[in-house]
Image: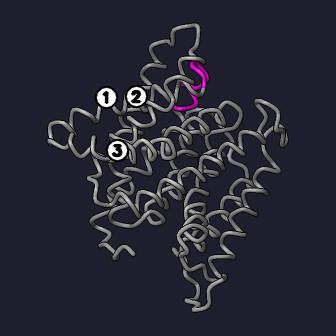
Amino acid sequence: MIAPQPAARWLPDFLLLSLLWGSSFLFLQKVSYAMGALPTSWMRVSIAALCLLPVVLLKQQGAILWRHRRELLLVGVFNSGLPFSLYAYALLSITTGLSSILNTMAPLFGALIAWLVFKEQLTRWRTLGMVLGFFGAALLALEAPGGVSFKPGGSGLAIACCLLGGLSYGISGNYTQRYLQHIPPMVLATGSQMGASIALLLPALWLWPGHAPDLPTWGALFVSAALCTGLAYVLFFRLIAQLGSSGAMTVTYVAPVFASVIGVVVLDEKITGWMLGCAAIVLVGTALATGLLPLKKASVSAR
């Protein structure tokens, strides 16, 4: 278990990361429309890796990066390669606000994996939280724009991609907390982006667009890569070291606020009462499942 840390130590990183990840949905959607999901994701992680690698080398941490290259490749696939590609595809069909709300399922998946794989205690309240979280996501899917469709480009498939992205984040967060705590955050961030870049290289080249993106698209891609990815993952891995994987992933509670406001102001998206109600159910469920809202310290586990 991670010992509680004073808020003054982690709150600035937490809020900045929320802003970066909330705004990333806007940039990701713009670039995905222009380049496609997989090329967008590959460029995003590759630019992030190029921005971070010189810092690692200047800090003389290159040997650590090389020594843990296999573990970092694995983290890169699940923490960046898969979820970035899944969300980039989803944003071709659904709004940034809806996708960011679905992203709040990541801590819930993290808690579920911690229970199933690592045998963490799951109380009745945490079990209820998991049920509520998935129930809220199901209700959200029912009112998706255009109805639920699992055909290519359908909202149902896009929502499923977002949920799979949350599952991927849950896997990587648990793995990082348990096996990579001793690796400096800068090395984790750099190595994970390099690993994701290697994993996505061939699929991205296969699906590379036949036209060159315009200048605003390149600008959105650079901001998404350097700030919303490179800097963001340095902050994220620092938060894992301070708060644990479940605590760090609760940043997804705040990111949708930024994403929704940006979507309304910049993209003229609509936030409906149904979306807000379902988001509340998901947030309460996830808070219970991760122990952030412990209504009762039950001593009997659900297993």
Quadrant that contains the C terminus = bottom right
Q: Residue 175, position in %: x, y?
A: 45, 58
* Tag of residue 137: none
- Residue on which the image places disc 3: 189
Q: Which residue is mark 2?
A: 46
Q: Are marks 2 and 1 in contact (CB under 8 Å)?
A: yes
Amino acid type of the residue that numbered disc 2 sits on in the rendered structure: Ser
- Using the numbered discs, state the Cα–Cα distance from disc 3 to disc 1 in whole angstroms: 11 Å
Secondary structure found at label 3:
helix
Asked if the stretch drawn in magenta spans residue 33, the answer is yes
Q: Amino acid at mark 3?
A: Ala
Q: Position of residue 188 (x, y in %)?
A: 33, 47
Assign a secondary structure to mark 2: helix
- Choose top left, top right, bottom left or bottom right for residue 121: bottom right
Query: Does 183 sit left or right of 132 as displayed?
Result: left
Mark 3, Cα crowd under 10 Å, few <14 / some 14-19 / many 20+, is many
User: Crowdedness of circle 1 by 10 Å Cα count: few (<14), some, many (20+)?
Assistant: some
Q: Which residue is depicted at the point 66% across and 72% down?
A: 129
Magenta range: 28-36
